[in-house]
Amino acid sequence: MGNVKENFKRSCLNGGMIAAVVIPLALPMALSNYLQFACLFPILPFALSYCEDKNSGYLKYILQRQGRKKYIRNRIFWCGISGGVAAALPSAILFLFLFCTTHPSSGIPDNMYYPSHLEQMIWEPYIGVGGGTLVLLMKLILVFLFGVFWAEFVLLLSMMICNKYIV
């Protein structure tokens, strides 16, 4: 259990995670479609960890203690978790803000809450479920998977090219 706590602290409770959460919330592009920069935030917390371990020489000692397969499994799992959380946490904060300010119980008329441009979207059958909460949860899951993908992709690149500035 101590290993899980230590891995969680190392992957999710670090300066990279703080930057990955604060920067999208602080910049105005976070309120719009910031897809061009969104792939940068999930890699900040932990995706370059293999590169850092190898370049510091610490990798040899880690592999002696826990073995190559366990090390690889841990890196893949915790890199995915940290990337997903780094991508989903700012979106979750924004969705919570939207849910609290534009929920139907807030007195907003229905024609303002359900704009006409949403009628032709794939989400249309689900917009009315729970006041749009289901749509926000599905989008949050997609954002989490987006973060997992980019973090794992950069982890793969860092294993092939062991220079964090190139990766």
Image (cartoon, helix red, strand yellow):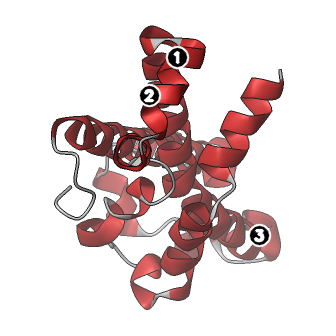
Observer able to see residue 101: yes
| Front residue of this view, candidates 159 and 66 | 66
Q: Which of marks 2 and 3 is nearer the N terminus?
A: 2
Camera-nearest label, 2 or 3: 2
| Front residue of this view, candidates 7 and 126 | 7
How packed mark 2 is, by other alpha carbons closer than 10 Å (few <14, some 14-19, many 20 or more), is: few
Observer able to see residue 128: no
Judge whether 26 appears above or below 45 on screen.
below
Q: Residue at x 32, y 46 (%)?
A: 150
Tell me the quarter of the picture where residue 107 sits: bottom right
Residue wearing tag 3: 100
Judging from the image, what secondary structure is the residue with disc 3 in? helix
Residue wearing tag 1: 64
Q: Which residue is drawn at 78% across and 34% down?
A: 5
Which disc, if any, is residue 60?
2
Tell me the quarter of the picture where residue 19 sits: bottom right
Q: Which of marks 3 and 1 is nearer the N terminus?
A: 1
Tell me the quarter of the picture where residue 81 sits: top right
- Residue 37, image x and y in percent? 29, 70
Q: Which residue is drawn at 51% across and 67% down?
A: 20
Judge whether 86 appears above or below 4 on screen.
below
Q: Residue at x 59, y 76 (%)?
A: 22
Judge whether 129 appears above or below 68 on screen.
below
- Residue 87, image x and y in percent? 49, 55
